[in-house]
Amino acid sequence: MKRVKTYIHGLDDILQGGIPQGHIVLLAGEPGTYKSSVAFNIIYNNVKNDKHVACYITLEQGRESLIQQMSQMGMDIGTVGSNLSIVDLALIRKNLEKLGQQSWMQIFKTYACNLKDNIDYSILVIDSLPVLTILAEFQNPRVELFHFFEWLREMNITCIIISEMKMGREEYGNMGEDFLSDGIVLLKMEKVSDVNMQRRIRIVKMRATEHSSDFFTLLFGKAGFTATRVISE
Ligand SMILES: Nc1ncnc2c1ncn2[C@@H]1O[C@H](COP(=O)(O)OP(=O)(O)O)[C@@H](O)[C@H]1O
Ligand SMILES: [Mg+2]
């Protein structure tokens, strides 16, 4: 089975090499837990090292802000050229005008499909699912999300969907996205002393993979992301 590496040192071994190609994976966590950075790290390194073509659709953070943040973290898109597309709401809106009276979701899908025809990306990041559902004005979230996942599967790509969790509420899956997805990766901020916090990562679910369900410490440094065993007292 082909796998897409996460390029988080230590985590790919835990995942038998990475995320199975074609999986739809939910990346869930509270604000500031590195969701966007981890997702970007995956596509950036896959484009750079493994000849993948990827697309990052950012609906929360503007394109320039994301590019700047990632560049500060050592991921300069200048080095990967046109094989990594970053699309934000402003860009979609620009195209939206040409598409006339269609629903937002229809426009989103048309945009994603056109881009697939043009650059043939194999990995897609959607940042984030809650914003997508707000923009799409889902009337019946469970049913509409089910159809959205069906549409995603037909694209035959590996997809990372970011799910925002509210502070202090370890909750995701309100619309059934937890059982619709093939994998769930949880990012967490953990209090380790009165004053210190540590970031954690846990594979909650990954279909077709034998993996540990433990929390690992997630560190970011010069060499990028690393997942290490939590040293418990
Ligand atoms: N240059 C940097 N190096 C390391 N960490 C950074 C850097 N810039 C920002 N951060 C950290 O990244 C966090 C934001 O990460 P991000 O991936 O945007 O989180 P999320 O998408 O989960 O909200 C910031 O709160 C900060 O702690
Ligand atoms: Mg983010």
Image (cartoon, grey):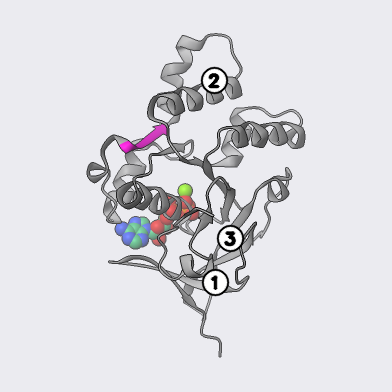
Tell me the residue that label 3 is attached to.
186
Answer few, some or many: residues within 10 Å of disc 3's Cα (few below 14, many 20 plus, some between 14 and 19): many
The residue located at (58%, 48%) in the rendering is 23
Amino acid type, mark 2: Ile
Q: Is residue 86 magenta?
A: yes
Q: Position of residue 53 (x, y in %)?
A: 38, 39
The residue located at (61%, 18%) in the rendering is 103
Residues rendered magenta in the picture: 83-87
Q: Is residue 136 visible?
A: yes
In whole angstroms, how far apart are the C-alphas of marks 3 and 2? Answer: 30 Å
Q: Earlier in the sequence, mark 3 or mark 2?
A: 2
The residue located at (67%, 34%) in the rendering is 150
Q: Is residue 166 visible?
A: no
Tell me the residue that label 2 is attached to.
107
Tell me the residue that label 1 is attached to.
190
Q: Is residue 63 above or below residue 39?
A: above
Q: Position of residue 161 (x, y in %)?
A: 55, 45
Horizontal relation, residue 131 to residue 41: left or right: right
